[in-house]
Amino acid sequence: MEVLTTRGLTKTYRGKDVVNSVDMHVEKGDIYGFIGKNGAGKTTLMKMVCGLTRPSQGGFTLFGSDDLGAGRKKIGCVIEQPALYPGMTARENLIYYSKMQGCEKTTDVDAMLNLVGLPDTNKKKSKKFSLGMKQRLSIAIALLGDPEFLVLDEPMNGLDPAGIREIRELLLGLHAKRQLTILMSSHILGELGKIATKYGIINSGVMVEEFSAEDLENRVKHYLHITVNDCEKAQRVLADKCNIRECRILEDQSLGVYEQIENAALINQALVQNDVLVSRLVSEGQDMEMYFVKRMGGY
Amino acid sequence: MLDIMKSEFYKVRKSKVTFVTALCLLGITLIEAFAMLYGRFAGGIWREALEGTRGINVYAGFVSGSFFLIFIALFVGGMISNEYTNRTVRQVVSRGASRVQIALGQFIALSTAMTLISLSFAALLSIVTGLCYGFGSISFGRFIMVVIGQIVIIWSYAAITMLIAHFARSGGLSIGLNVMFLLGGEMASSILQFLTKKEYFYTYWIENMQMCAINFDLEAAKQAKFTGILFVIGAICLVLGLVRFKIRDVD
């Protein structure tokens, strides 16, 4: 089931499309990494999903339904900075939101504080919390009412490496235990790479592409790019002589070899000795960050 | 709706704005109570000046004047504007509850808190005054009209403040607009009355209607009329405030 499906979703501010006809698909169980430069439209799209702003055109469904009010009761979100009542303690903030949702058991509130690692804040007002504590409390608030879908806008922003790891482990734990679907934007591509199962890249309000984590691995994997006169024969030779199975014919009718990349010379020798003419052999591939930067419209 | 109201009452109870507003009103009450007691026991010109004061006048007059309306603006406007400043309005709106219910729940909680605080201190001050100078006399029906007038004043001005706050979004701007509305409006109504020689510019200005709604020496029909007009103004502003909050982008 698709938890979130957007169709031509557009938001226009003062004549400018900050989100431009975006089609997005978040499946149940996904940890969807939403990537884009500053000002690309990520937060605006998330705000529309959470009901903070209205779309100018297009629409979306939640949990397969057009009844967004009912759908939003199953969502928890953290948009931009943590939104806490500064004069209240962590517990009081949670009690307020849990009363609003009709779940008033204080044991649930205490359990939530334990879950996010804030059991001992007692009478400390949230205005005195560190950023990491505020982020964790915000996630706790988002988790009230047992949502099925979390929308998190840069939850690791401003955190130190220890804080980032804590949030990552918290989210992975929630995903595993509660089968939560998570839509998460972040600039920290390395962290997203450790957690996301699917990606969406947005650039200047336009969705560039969506792909799974598996696809991404294939796209950034290093390989030997070999131009030969007979690709199919070359595949057979490599399979028989070098025991190479992971070998594909690419779009430009050349060969991509994904195994034994370090043995380029032996691969070349095997091909030539079996009457396959090699006109070009080069090692290619890029790291994940470079791939994303290019797709986001960078250099 | 009930859940929203419970949460809003909880928030009002926990808020520093509520505490400060109550403290300020308590301070004013205690100062006035002290003045009553001092006049009673010190005697002299002080006592002469307060001799005509009665408990019921003090009770009714507690919610009169632009000073009291500014308190409503500080409390209601402050609480609503804080939601935008802290960005908690985003979290509140994203939970799937109806925006109209959220805004209405806030309004009810804030107006109820302001009413309870004000009328409690009004009662306290009237008891002190009554013990010092007498309570005065008033029929039960007129007393009920006074109480209704007080409640309408508080709730109507809270609705006006809520409307201003949902447009202004910032606490400072909200208070500023309220002060301009009250002071500028009074000046404008006086000037218009002077220039046009038409009484109704002043008669139907909010502060005059406020005084009339709690004036039990006025004819009952007139008191009821001004209370009714304030009620209608409050109701219109409440509806406009709810609509504004319902349709606006919260970002």
Image: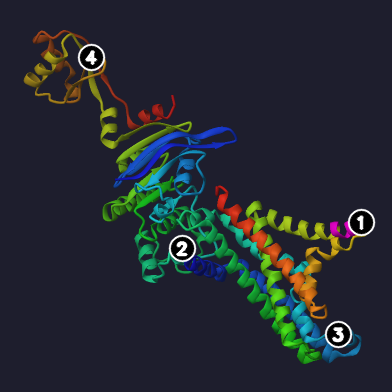
Q: CA distance from mark 1 to mark 4?
A: 91 Å
Mark number displayed over residue A97: 2
Residue A186 shown in magenta:
no
Q: Which chain does the residue under circle 1 lie in? A: B
Total marks drawn? 4
Q: Are marks 4 and 2 in contact (CB under 8 Å)?
A: no
Quarter of the figure with residue B221? bottom right
Mark number displayed over residue B196: 1
Q: Is residue A28 left or right of residue B112?
A: left
At 80% across and 83% down in the image, what residue appears? B35
Same chain for mark 4 and mark 2? The answer is: yes
The residue that label 4 is drawn on is: A253
Q: Secondary structure at mark 1?
A: helix
What amino acid is found at the position of numbered circle 1 in the picture? Thr
Q: Secondary structure at mark 3?
A: helix
What amino acid is found at the position of numbered circle 3 in the picture? Leu
Give percent across and percent down for residue A276. Answer: 13, 9
Q: Residues within 10 Å of mark 2 (few under 14, many from 20)?
A: many
Q: Are marks 3 and 4 in contact (CB under 8 Å)?
A: no
Q: Which stretch appears magenta? A: B188-196
Q: Which chain does the residue under circle 3 lie in? A: B
At 12% across and 24% down in the image, what residue appears? A244
Residue A83 in view here = no
What amino acid is found at the position of numbered circle 2 in the picture? Tyr
Q: Secondary structure at mark 2?
A: helix
Same chain for mark 3 and mark 2? The answer is: no
Q: Is residue A234 left or right of residue B201?
A: left
Q: CA distance from mark 4 to mark 2?
A: 59 Å
Quarter of the figure with residue A210? top left
The residue that label 3 is drawn on is: B50
